[in-house]
Image: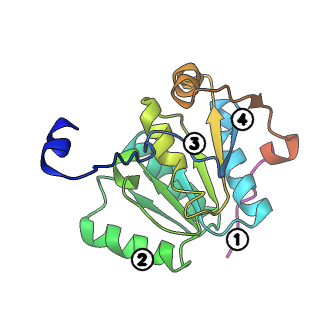
């Protein structure tokens, strides 16, 4: 500020809201769910509710690939973004997601960074991120430009220990919910 005073007349300070704080437009839920039930919960949430533009995050590329392959096999129009996907295919995938041709986009944190697509109604954290800042970046894909959004995180036995650090980052507690039993029913494979 001293330099500004020296070279300007009546300087002002402009503060920009931190990018590390979750938007108030995003309704956040955490479901306590066993790892073996995470896919059933994801599938049933997406298909029962008819959600059209959903981002799903997982921590590892092999998880992203597995989730996307299962969704596609079970009749959900899905695609993946990870470091293993060539750049030209990433661009085509993002265009398809933006245009509504792809219903569910499954991504790693690195691939999901910088995605600015309006109309993403839901973000699902299939696995909780290992870094609290990544949680804020993930859920920031929804609730953009004044729109409301919903974030649903699955906390299983293998990643629920991440919650205290995430809550500390957010500056508040997020209560864990038990998913309704109908969302944990077996996935019935689609036949073509």
Residue 189 highlighted magenta (yes or no): yes
Query: How far apart are the alpha carbons under marks 1 and 2?
Result: 28 Å
| Residue position marked by numbered label 1 in the rendering | 191
Task: Tell me what residue is drawn at x 19 percent, y 45 percent.
Answer: 4
Query: Which sits earlier in the primary sequence, circle 4 or circle 1?
Result: 4
Query: Which sits earlier in the primary sequence, circle 4 or circle 3?
Result: 4
> Which is closer to the viewer, label 4 or label 1?
4
Quadrant (top left, top right, bottom left, bottom right) of the N terminus: top left
| Residue position marked by numbered label 3 in the rendering | 126
Quadrant (top left, top right, bottom left, bottom right) of the C terminus: bottom right
Element at label 4: strand
Q: Which mark is residue 95?
A: 2
> Which is closer to the viewer, label 3 or label 2?
2
Element at label 2: helix
Magenta range? 185-192
Q: Is residue 80 left or right of residue 73?
A: left
> Which is closer to the viewer, label 3 or label 1?
3
């Amino acid at each position: 500020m001293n330099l500004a005073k020296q070279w300007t007349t009546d300087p002002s300070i402009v503060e920009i809201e931190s990018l590390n704080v979750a938007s108030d437009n995003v309704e956040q839920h955490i479901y306590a769910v066993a790892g073996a039930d995470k896919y059933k919960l994801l599938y049933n949430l997406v298909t029962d509710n008819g959600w059209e533009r959903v981002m799903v995050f997982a921590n590892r590329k092999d998880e992203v690939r597995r989730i996307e392959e299962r969704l596609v096999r079970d009749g959900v129009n899905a695609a993946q973004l990870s470091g293993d996907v060539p750049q030209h295919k990433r661009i085509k995938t993002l265009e398809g997601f933006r245009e509504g041709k792809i219903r569910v986009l499954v991504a790693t944190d690195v691939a999901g960074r910088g995605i600015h697509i309006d109309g993403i109604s839901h973000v699902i954290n299939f696995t909780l991120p290992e870094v609290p800042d990544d949680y804020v970046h993930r859920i920031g894909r929804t609730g953009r430009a004044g729109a409301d959004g919903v974030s649903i995180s699955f906390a299983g036995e293998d990643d629920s220990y991440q919650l205290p650090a995430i809550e500390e980052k957010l500056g508040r507690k997020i209560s864990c919910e038990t998913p309704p039993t109908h969302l944990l029913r077996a996935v019935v494979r689609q036949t073509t």
